[in-house]
Amino acid sequence: MSAVEALHAAIAAGIGIAVNGESLSLKASSPPPEHVLTGLSRNKAEIIALLRPRADGWSAEDWQMFFDERAGIVEFDGGVSRSKAEVQAFACCVSEWMNHHPAISSPDGCLACGGSDSAHDPLLPFGADSQGHAWLHSRCWKGWYEVRKEAAIAALTVMGIEIPAKFPNDFGKNGSI
């Protein structure tokens, strides 16, 4: 079970999660299933890294304000229904979360598969972070990017930003984000 899968399982089990220093604080109305707790425990460091505010200092409240602002702009300025506006706002939050949590790796190996650079399969820099890039083979990018989106969705959900009912969570398979 990955960190993202552990977060999804915790959310599905009704567990509230917060970062408290180097620990996770859990709140639930009933005892969670053991496999969920095991998944959270095994992936604690990665979950904390996903949920901890970065140097930008955005809190859960900041993310909620960002979501509400984007939804309001789309709804009122764009003349779109609230449910459609929330879908677009959530997509903006996913993109913004990935911008706030850049993936940076060494140019010595593919961040996704670990393979090295070669003439027939070069490593390419992805991202625009001033600190560096994520180095990937072009064939590895799509799967890696899907995992990044899943991590963003999990982190936003933990912060209380609910996935809109009509959010096309197909990670680009049918033309969605």
Image (spheres, helix red, strand yellow):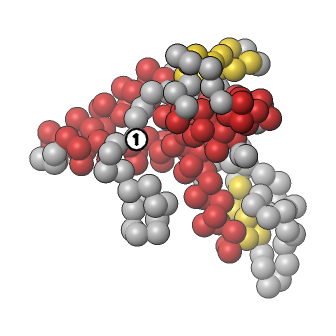
Q: Quadrant of residue 114?
A: bottom right
Split into 4 quadrants, where in the image is the C terminus?
bottom left
* Residue 18 visible, this angle: no
In the depicted view, which residue is nearer to us: 168 or 60? 168
Residue underneath mark 1: 163
Please tell me whether residue 6 is drawn above or below residue 14 in the rendered image: below
Please tell me whether residue 150 is drawn above or below residue 20 in the rendered image: below
The residue under the point 77% across, 58% down is 111
The residue under the point 36% across, 51% down is 167
Q: Quadrant of residue 49?
A: top right
> Residue 20 at x, y = what percent?
68, 14
> Residue 73 at x, y = what percent?
23, 39
Please tell me whether residue 143 is drawn above or below residue 40 in the rendered image: below
Question: Exactly how many numbered labels are in the figure?
Answer: 1
The residue under the point 64% across, 44% down is 5
Tell me if mark 1 has few (under 14), some (14-19) or many (20+) residues whose alpha carbon lies within 10 angstroms of its own: some
From the viewer's perspective, tell me whether residue 3 is left or right of residue 29: right
> Residue 44 at x, y = what percent?
75, 30
The residue under the point 70% across, 54% down is 133
List the single residue furthest toward the bottom: 120
Q: Secondary structure at mark 1?
A: loop
From the viewer's perspective, tell me whether residue 117 is left or right of residue 101: right
